[in-house]
Image (cartoon, rainbow, N blue to C red):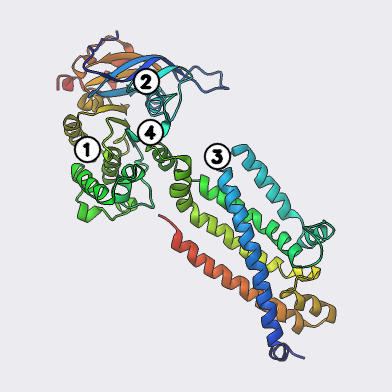
Amino acid sequence: MNLWEFFVSHRAEIFEATIAHLFLVAVSMAIAILIGVSLGMILVKRKRLRALALGFASILQTIPSLALFGFLIPIPFLGGIGTRTAVIALVLYALLPILRNTVVGLTNLDPAVLEAAEAMGMTEMQILLKVRFPLGLSVILAGVRTATVITIGVATIAAAIGAGGLGTFIFRGVAMVSDAVILAGAIPAALLALAADAALGLLERRLKVV
Amino acid sequence: MNAKVEERGDITIEFRDVEYRIFGTSREPILSRIALKIAQGETLVLLGRSGSGKTTLLKLINGLLHATRGDVYVNGGKVAKVDAIRLRRGIGYVIQEAGLFPHYTVAENIGLVPTLESWKEDRIAARVEEMMRLVGLEPTEYAQRKPRELSGGQRQRVGVARALAADPPILLMDEPFGALDPVTRAELQREFAALAKRLAKTIVFVTHDLREALRLGSRIVLLQAGKIVADARPQEFLRIDHPEVRAFAASFEVAHEAGA
């Protein structure tokens, strides 16, 4: 069976898997953004803790993804087989680029602007929300973009622990030694990654100040 | 050598034996034994070389830095004890790089402190327009521009307008015209001198430019290595017999302006 025939005959299944894949990515990204951005905001004024958090996030990133999924399975409450475990692993992966870019975006600003903000009598919270955040937003978004592309890719491996998604076809294709089946998962995943990259890149340029 | 300036009116800012040093360094303190009274309505110029401590002294007034010994008083309150936010909203601040918010329009930048102080919108708009005219920027042309669409001189004008918007009784200026070309600088100095006379605010102005000090100051305080070494009216300043005063005088050849 060639690729095109497989696509046509399994289109409903592929579409379903794509939606499941998107769902997995969207949920993981939402959680990762929530944690990464808030943690980044907390770390703005805490230099020591910042190095620690970034170091920890970097270590998480170095664990091979298949191994991370494997590690999580035996952990009670968090782990096991299925979507929940996959989401946790994906969040851990997405965390570093988001956290790093949030910290850089919120701290790497023109010192004259920050000095003026402080001297005008803005509170720490006002400086964070009205100065640091809008000026750092495009950098934060660049981190979200990187994380999204990574997550779309890594989410294919989530199928290995029964979380579904486009990885299902890839693993099935590997088992069947069928290029067509592998590509039925790989091509939609690659297209998703490209589309997300382009859309978030556009948004990032829109929000860039200066 | 400290030519005593007689006290005129109320004391707005006072330094009582202030020292500032950075902890964990064995270096000499950045400021030591600073005793200084600044009267209401004075335009006091802090003159000194780079690293003499003049910017540090300025930042002790609005609490951006805190004295490691001694106390700084503003309007009778200890800077270390009063609410820093309240203190700063009553002190205008202008710096060399202007420090305008790049994501705000000119009008939003100027209206910053009134907005923080929750003024009504129409009052802010009226005040912003008034400030723009005061610093020579046509509101219809510049109000909606972003700082990046302005020249260096225009940005400094906006910086001055922002500092004055909430009508603070004190104005701190840290080499506000230092990064401008000589022609624009002279223009802004002239306008600012006239403005300062009219506004009757207490102004502390930091510069390393003796010419600027003589043009703008009603009093000049010279800092050298963290200590006050001269304190005089501009007319008398160049007659002070101190090596650092002579060094400044020699480097600028402005003796002919002394009486100006």
Residue at disc 4, secondary structure: helix
Q: Give the alpha-carbon distance from disc 1 to disc 4, as whole Å.
A: 29 Å
- In-front residue for pair B240/A125: A125
Q: Amino acid at mark 3?
A: Lys
Depth check, mark 4 against mark 2: the one in front is 4
Q: Amino acid at mark 2?
A: Tyr
Would you name the residue on which mark 3 appears? A45
Name the quadrant of the C terminus of chain B.
top left
Residue at disc 3, secondary structure: loop
Q: Are marks 2 and 3 in contact (CB under 8 Å)?
A: no
- Which residue corresponds to the image point at 73% horizontal and 50% vertical from the top-left? A59
Check if mark 1 and mark 4 are on a common chain.
yes
Would you name the residue on which mark 1 appears? B188
Depth check, mark 2 against mark 3: the one in front is 2
Chain bearing mark 2: B
Depth check, mark 1 against mark 4: the one in front is 4
Chain bearing mark 1: B
Q: Give the alpha-carbon distance from disc 3 to disc 1, as whole Å.
A: 37 Å
